[in-house]
Image (tube, rainbow, N blue to C red):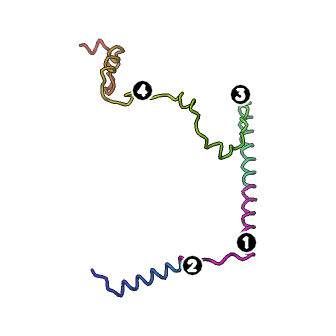
Amino acid sequence: MSISRTSVITIAAVCGAWASFANAKLPPPTPQEQEQAEQKKAKAAAEAQEQKAALTKVQDQIAARYIAAQQAKGITVTPTPIAAAAPAAATTKEVPAAAMDNRPTEKAGAYNEQVSPQSAQTSAATGSPPNGQKPNDQKPDEQKK
């Protein structure tokens, strides 16, 4: 299938027209439009505040109902106070070196399925199968028969 020269020129012209529309800038908003946008933002912020207050109220009611139910069972419940959110800079600090030294370390070969001489000796002493082998459910006396 071949494309004719006129088709290529037509496609190029359409792409050029779309590119010019894409690069066009919108005019700056008028003062009325700016005022309307600010009113919408203020209305959305007020609505979010109302929703947050309603959510807090419902959460407090549920907590009070739970505490009352637990007290009826004879269990004392004390709510944990929620601390204020930490600033963003405090959450991105590095871990101290002392904390890094106390990390648990993975034993060498813990996930290795090959049988090493050391694991074979250890398993022979304890009676458990070496790494990579399935445990045998038979008792040691039954294995010898």
Check contact, mark 1 vs mark 4: CB within 8 A: no
- Residue 35 magenta-highlighted: yes
The type of residue carrying mark 2 is: Ala
Mark 1–mark 4 distance (CA, rounded to whole Å): 64 Å
Q: Residue 124 lies in what quarter of the image?
A: top left
Q: Is residue 4 above or below residue 55?
A: below
CA gap, disc 2 and disc 4: 63 Å
In the structure shown, which secondary structural element does the residue marked by tag 3 occupy? loop
Disc 4 residue type (three-letter): Lys
Residue under the image location 63 percent in, 43 percent down: 91
Q: Residues within 10 Å of mark 1 (few under 14, many from 20)?
A: few
Which mark is on residue 75? 3
Residue 2 pos. (x, y %) = 28, 81
Q: Which residues are magenta?
A: 22-50
Dot 1 or dot 4, earlier in sequence = 1
Which sits earlier in the primary sequence, circle 1 or circle 2?
Answer: 2
Residue under label 1, please give it.
34
Residue named by callout 4: 107
> Which numbered disc, 1 or 2, marks the residue closer to the eye?
2
Image side of residue 70 versus residue 25, left or right: right
Q: Which mark is residue 24?
A: 2
